[in-house]
Image: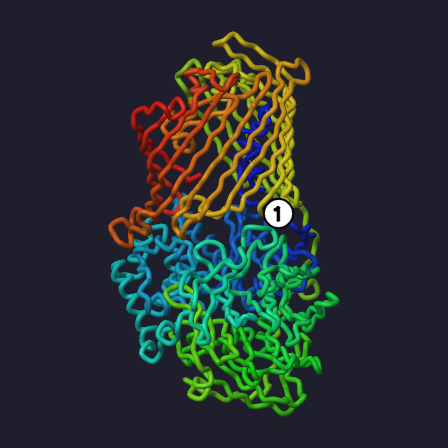
């Protein structure tokens, strides 16, 4: 949908310039919701929220003021102005935000936007994480203002900033103690030897590893040199553009000595525990060892064949796979793709790490995917390999981890509602009736139904440890409607599953150790006593105390002793333990035979007495009743962009040109204004004649994006598409005064309809041909766009995209202009292997009628070997095919001297291009336009990706004419840009 923003500028011309407009592909960022925004004013913040999430916003307001007080002391600085914070109740709501024009990937927890100084944060169902992200983003706010103040104090323009690895590391460090993910990543980086030293931090720019290494460095500085040095690094960063010099100045050591000292600090911190632990690859057998593989489930089909189903990511989309296994759960065949995700509206995306699946006794797989603006629940028959049905549940935004009851008639799952709270639900399949089991502010996840159907085990932070990142296991009793606590302590117990006999629950857990850090995540088992006494440990009341009259005793068994992490345990009927393991920065599916042996000889056994003496945590809140002020949202505009310039030419033809471009928007980014004004003239008397003005408005808050505007353009210009301009020197003068409008309606994330219209008065003069033409031009265009392509580092690697555009332009007054436009652009990407793609492009374009515009080809982006844009005509067909393959991936890994140049990869391509352009007759030749003959090129190309964003292209080969009957001289072309 964001193609509309750029396309509107093209539509200001008198003709709906379909040649440019249709070229826009891209997926759609859809506004599914119409949020009714309100403002909660606190002492230092303006909190933006919608009524459904008012309670959540009040908790967020409390967390923000709490963070402000702490950070004001830590930075010794008060923010110069109020900070706007925009809350969303769920990640899917957050992904609809217009505060940033781009797509927000899953897993992004929030951001601080510099232009308007606004903070944008979604809730995820967990109040501890919500609080931590608020602290994280406010550290960014304080850091930004404190750094700018340091520059102003020394009269230095804001032409530099702190490196991202330091700002993100500092935000992580000062937002709370390291969590288990931090510990897991650093342990694995050291064990697998992929820790990146300080001097090479740019190699992991923007990655999760960068965040964690930056956090570890800040912890190291605080522990080694003193925490005040972190603030001093911000206050002193003005002294040099090179942050390495700043580090040396503040810490008083050579940069490489600091880097080496940090690495030794990390090794002392983590490697000392390695001798007593083991790695997953040494303690278990791999079922799936490629890509990223998680969330295994098991089913034995009627023919006796056992299958393991799992989520897998082979470097692109996350899909649902199946692998056959024998009785010992060793793979007996290759994995096969079961359901393709990310290519259709029904299966838009699936969470690789947060969402589990489950299989009923009858072989029906239950899983959730995103579809539109919310999650849906799918049932898939594994015997027939066919989708049975899909449930769309009103008022539930995100669904997680469905689990079957024993007879396959009901499904339990956790879900986030429109208010941002995550609770447990049960769906009755026969009637479609939905029952809510819990209704409180706690994070209830990972439900699993007991074999006897009475209990639902789940993980929750409804404990005294919830405000310290703790989660324990609980049982929901369907007979009594009461909740019992199953584990206790400062630990994170997740992903429980029952043993086949119902006597144990296996789960993944990380325990807070005596050194104050979370240990490795391992597989544990807890003994569940049959026939528990009917005494509740907790109720569904939001602030219930955990206070049983006679607390039971639980025995916990540690079944693995891994140095990295284990997730998603499954206890199979044959007594094998399946799980996903993290090692070498990837997830694999693994198995350990004979769980009973591990239970008999556990690595650790503990006994937990559920005393229930401490109540569940109660987060604070700020509301209109205790210090905040509530008011409706009023749209106000502020400047986003201002650009101006002037150029003076000694040429009598071009004269002097100057102008400015301004962009305004409201705080939420829903309503945007663009103003352009510039002047071109050849004398002081041509002020009005050479004045160019355009005013546009784009509204993005509805599902249909709307744009409209007024413009006046006048002056000399080169126009390769104008049929009246000389081919060798297409210079003309034209005055355009008009208005335009455009609509973009997304059918789904992958498909949209675009409609545009423009009405303009045109006065055109072509002096070289003595042509003067006036017209009142009405231009209409309709486009259907599809794009499900997946992008790699250099361009699309999988999927397809297409654009069909129809247009008509006519002169309403003089009938000087009347032509129609047809353009069909189809591009397909077939991934032959993980790194080899066959890309095909077909293009058909027609302009037919009076004063029909010309299309053009030529250059490195389409018809190679021919001069840029020199192949021109009213009609054309074009095709291109490329076999894209790797030559050297991550060359700096093999040649460290290349690392400072930011070379990401070197790839090659074998290409074949062919095209035919014509005007009146298919075979009529106009040599200056290359019309009337089939042209082509065959050769090889090289693509060098620098810093992940700049792709240099070098093509060489032979060009052909006259239907490939005539081979001309060899050509070489150097250019830049992504692959088509």
Residue linked to disc 1 = 748
Q: In the picture provided, is 635 more to the left or to the right than 337?
A: right
For this view, does 109 lie left or right of residue 251? right
Numbered label tally: 1
Residue 418 visible to an observer of this rendering: no
- Give the percent coordinates (x, y) of residue 425: 67, 70
- Kindly identify the residue that appears in the image at 62 percent across and 36 percent down: 754
Residue lying farthest to the front in this orientation: 303
The residue most toward the bottom is 550
Position above or below: 898 against 826:
below
Relative to 825, is 587 above or below? below
Q: Position of residue 84 (x, y in %)?
A: 58, 53
As drawn, is 569 to the left or to the right of 615? left
Q: Image quadrant for the N terminus?
A: top right
For numbered disc 1, what is the local secondary structure? strand
Front residue (pair 50, 971): 971
Residue 775 point in image, percent of width and height: 63, 16
Horizontal arrangement in the rendering, residue 206 relative to residue 702 (left or right): left
Quarter of the image for residue 450 reads bottom right
> Residue 734: horizontal and vertical position, in percent?
55, 17
Task: Give the crowd class for mark 1: few <14, some 14-19, many >=20 residues within 10 Å.
Answer: some
Residue 698 in view in this figure: yes
**Foreground: 495 or 337?**
337
Give the colouring mode of the picture: rainbow
Residue 4, compared with residue 478, is above or below; it is: above
Screen quadrant of the C terminus: top left
């Amino acid at each position: 949908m964001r193609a509309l923003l750029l396309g509107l500028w093209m539509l200001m011309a008198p003709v709906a310039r379909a040649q440019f407009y249709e070229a826009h592909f891209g997926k759609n960022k859809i506004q599914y919701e119409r949020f009714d925004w309100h403002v909660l004013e606190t002492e230092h913040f303006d909190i933006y929220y919608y009524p459904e999430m008012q309670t959540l916003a009040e908790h967020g307001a409390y967390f923000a003021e709490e963070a402000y007080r702490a950070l004001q002391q830590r930075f010794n600085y008060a923010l110069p102005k109020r900070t706007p914070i925009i809350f969303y109740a769920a990640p899917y709501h957050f992904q609809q935000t217009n505060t940033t024009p781009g797509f927000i990937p899953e897993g992004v927890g929030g951001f601080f936007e510099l232009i308007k100084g606004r903070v944008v944060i979604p809730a995820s169902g967990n109040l501890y994480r919500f609080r931590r992200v608020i602290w994280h983003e406010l550290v960014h706010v304080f850091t930004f203002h404190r750094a700018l103040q340091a520059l102003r104090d020394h009269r230095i323009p804001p032409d530099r900033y702190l490196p991202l690895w330091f700002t993100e590391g500092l935000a992580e460090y000062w937002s709370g103690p390291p969590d288990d993910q931090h510990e897991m990543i650093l342990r694995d980086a050291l064990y697998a030897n992929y820790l990146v030293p300080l001097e090479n931090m740019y190699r992991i720019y923007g990655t999760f590893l960068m965040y964690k290494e930056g956090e570890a460095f800040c912890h190291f500085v605080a522990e080694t040199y003193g925490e005040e040095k972190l603030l001093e690094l911000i206050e002193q960063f003005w002294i040099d553009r090179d942050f390495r010099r700043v580090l040396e100045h503040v810490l008083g050591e050579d940069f490489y000595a600091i880097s080496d000292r940090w690495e030794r600090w990390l090794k002392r911190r983590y490697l000392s525990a390695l001798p007593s632990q083991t790695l997953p690859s040494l303690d278990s057998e791999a079922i799936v060892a490629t890509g990223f593989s998680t969330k295994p489930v098991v089913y034995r089909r009627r023919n006796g064949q056992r299958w393991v189903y799992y989520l897998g990511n082979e470097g692109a989309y996350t899909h649902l796979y199946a692998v056959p296994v024998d009785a010992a759960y060793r793979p007996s065949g290759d994995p096969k793709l079961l359901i393709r995700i990310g290519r259709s509206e029904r299966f838009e995306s699936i969470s690789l790490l947060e969402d589990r699946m489950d299989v009923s006794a009858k072989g029906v797989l239950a899983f959730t995917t995103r579809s539109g603006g919310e999650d849906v629940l799918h049932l898939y028959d594994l015997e027939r390999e066919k989708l049975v049905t899909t449930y769309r549940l009103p008022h539930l935004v995100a669904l997680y981890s469905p689990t079957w009851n024993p007879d396959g008639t009901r499904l339990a799952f956790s879900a986030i509602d429109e208010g941002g709270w995550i609770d447990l639900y049960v769906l009755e399949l026969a009637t479609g009736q939905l029952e809510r089991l819990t209704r409180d502010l706690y994070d209830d996840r990972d439900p699993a139904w007991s074999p006897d159907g009475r209990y639902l085990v789940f993980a929750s932070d409804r404990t005294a440890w919830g405000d310290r990142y703790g989660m324990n296991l609980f049982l929901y009793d369907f007979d009594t409607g009461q909740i019992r606590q199953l584990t206790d302590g400062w630990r994170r117990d997740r992903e429980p599953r029952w043993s086949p006999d119902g006597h144990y629950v296996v789960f993944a857990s990380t325990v807070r150790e005596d050194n104050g850090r979370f240990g490795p995540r391992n597989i544990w088992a807890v003994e569940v006593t049959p026939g528990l006494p009917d005494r509740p440990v907790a109720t569904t009341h939001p602030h219930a105390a955990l206070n049983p009259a006679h607390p039971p005793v639980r025995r916990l068994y540690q079944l693995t002793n891994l140095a990295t992490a284990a997730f998603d345990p499954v206890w199979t009927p044959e007594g094998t333990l399946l799980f996903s393991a993290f090692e070498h920065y990837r997830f694999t599916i693994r198995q350990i035979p004979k769980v009973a042996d591990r239970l008999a000889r556990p690595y650790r056994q503990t006994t937990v007495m559920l005393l229930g003496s401490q109540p569940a945590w109660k987060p604070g809140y700020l509301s209109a009743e205790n210090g905040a002020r509530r008011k409706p949202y009023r749209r106000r505009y502020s400047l986003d962009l201002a650009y101006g310039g002037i150029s003076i030419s000694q040429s009598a033809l071009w004269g002097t040109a100057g102008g400015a471009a301004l962009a305004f928007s409201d705080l939420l980014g829903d309503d945007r204004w663009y103003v352009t004004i510039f002047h071109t003239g050849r004398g002081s008397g041509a002020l009005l004649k050479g004045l160019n003005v355009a005013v546009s408005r784009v509204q993005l808050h509805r599902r249909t994006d709307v744009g409209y505007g007024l413009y006046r353009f006048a002056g000399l210009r080169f126009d390769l598409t104008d049929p009246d301009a000389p081919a060798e020197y297409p210079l003309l003068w034209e005055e355009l005064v008009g208005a335009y409008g455009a609509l973009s309606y997304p059918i789904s994330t992958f498909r949209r309809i675009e409609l545009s219209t423009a009405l303009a008065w045109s006065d055109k003069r072509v002096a070289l041909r003595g042509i003067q033409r006036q017209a009142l031009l009405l231009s209409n265009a309709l486009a259907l766009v599809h794009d499900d392509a997946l992008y790699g580092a250099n361009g699309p690697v999988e999927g397809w995209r297409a654009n069909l555009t129809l247009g008509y332009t006519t002169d309403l007054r003089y009938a000087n202009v009347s032509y129609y436009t047809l353009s069909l652009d189809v591009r397909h990407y077939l991934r032959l292997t993980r790194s080899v793609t066959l890309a095909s492009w077909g293009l058909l374009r027609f302009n037919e009628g009076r004063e029909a515009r010309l299309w053009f080809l030529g250059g490195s982006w389409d018809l190679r070997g021919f001069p840029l844009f020199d192949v021109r005509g009213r009609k054309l067909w074009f095709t291109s095919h490329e076999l894209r393959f790797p030559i050297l991936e991550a060359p700096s890994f093999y040649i460290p001297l290349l690392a400072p140049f930011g070379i990401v990869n070197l790839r090659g391509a074998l290409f074949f291009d062919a095209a035919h352009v014509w005007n009146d007759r298919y075979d009529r030749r106009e040599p200056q336009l290359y019309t009337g003959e089939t042209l082509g090129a065959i050769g090889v190309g090289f693509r060098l990706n620098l810093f992940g964003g700049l792709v240099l292209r070098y093509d060489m080969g032979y060009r052909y004419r006259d239907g490939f009957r005539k081979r001309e001289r060899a050509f070489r072309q150097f250019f830049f840009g992504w692959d088509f």
